[in-house]
Amino acid sequence: MALKEEFERQGNWLFRYRGVLPIIILFIGAYLYLQTEIYPETFILEGTLYEIYYEVACLIISLLGLSIRIYTVGYTPENTSGRNTAKGQVAETLNTSGVYSVVRHPLYLGNFLMWLGVCLLTGNLWFIIAFCLLYWVYYERIMFAEEQFLSRKFGTVYSEWADKTPAFLPDFGLFIKPSLSFSWKKVLKKEKNGLLALFLIFCAFDLSGEWVEHQKAYNYVLIIACLISIISYCVLKYLKKKTGVLNEAGR
């Protein structure tokens, strides 16, 4: 099998099991985070006045990733920016405006920053480097498979857009105003899981760290944010399943 075909096959397989990578990262990251709490000498900022600022910075990086996802999803039409169907990849139109005018894979960039914030929270340099390398290898093949599909479907239109638009690192000088208006309904329907997961993870890390150290200096702002995200998730889940409030034609 040619390398080109092998990369595409691997990319389609990896996308099907893309939920496994976050679980692996989460378990390893949680273990290393607790190790840092137990052995504070392994992380230079542990136990210092700057530790809280570092944790806030980690959360901001993850929230930046979520914000990129929210911006991307909010401006995309129906049946694009996703392959979650039994038939495989879906793309009725090619997104080339808005965030897609500055980077070809904004959702994967958002995912990277969301999980980078979690990895940074461990304070383990080697784990952070390993995550970056693993993410690169993992998603490089997924992006390759996706681009092969888009190239076959949209031909020269795709090639001309891909030639000038970076794959992963945005070039903001290329920005073109989105062709659609922003849809909060689509965002609330699609990104509620990410918001819940983000605050659950950061809150769980903070609580477990305090328990391991036998302390009670809990981050109550983080706990409140986590509770709000849980309530919001439940409400949005109900609205999605039982009503049509979040439905929007073409989105």
Image (spheres, grey):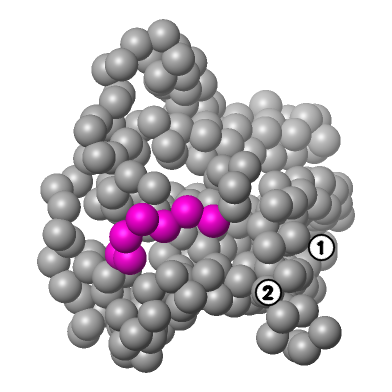
Q: Residue at x 47, y 54 (%)?
A: 90
Q: Residue at x 74, y 51 (%)?
A: 17
Please state which amino acid type lies under the numbered disc 1. Answer: Glu
Residue 135, horizontal then vertical, whole percent = 67, 69
Locate residue 197 relative to residue 77 in the image: left or right: right
As for residue 250 lying within the magenta part, the answer is: no
The answer to whether residue 113 is visible is no
Locate residue 186 relative to residue 201 in the image: left or right: left
Report the quarter where the C terminus lies.
top left
Q: Residue at x 42, y 37 (%)?
A: 190
Q: Looking at the image, tell me whether mark 1 or mark 2 is earlier in sequence order.
A: 2
Instruction: Reply above or below: 224 against 92.
Output: above
Report the quarter where the N terminus lies.
bottom right
As for residue 93 lying within the magenta part, the answer is: yes
Please state which amino acid type lies under the numbered disc 2. Answer: Glu
Residue 103, horizontal then vertical, whole percent = 37, 75
- Quickly name the residue at label 1: 41
Instruction: Reply above or below: 91 against 160.
Output: above
Tag on residue 212? none
Range shown magenta: 89-95
**Most extreme residue toward the top, as rendered?**
242
Tag on residue 8? 2
Secondary structure at numbered mark 1: helix
Locate residue 231 relative to residue 93 in the image: left or right: right
Residue 133, horizontal then vertical, whole percent = 72, 77
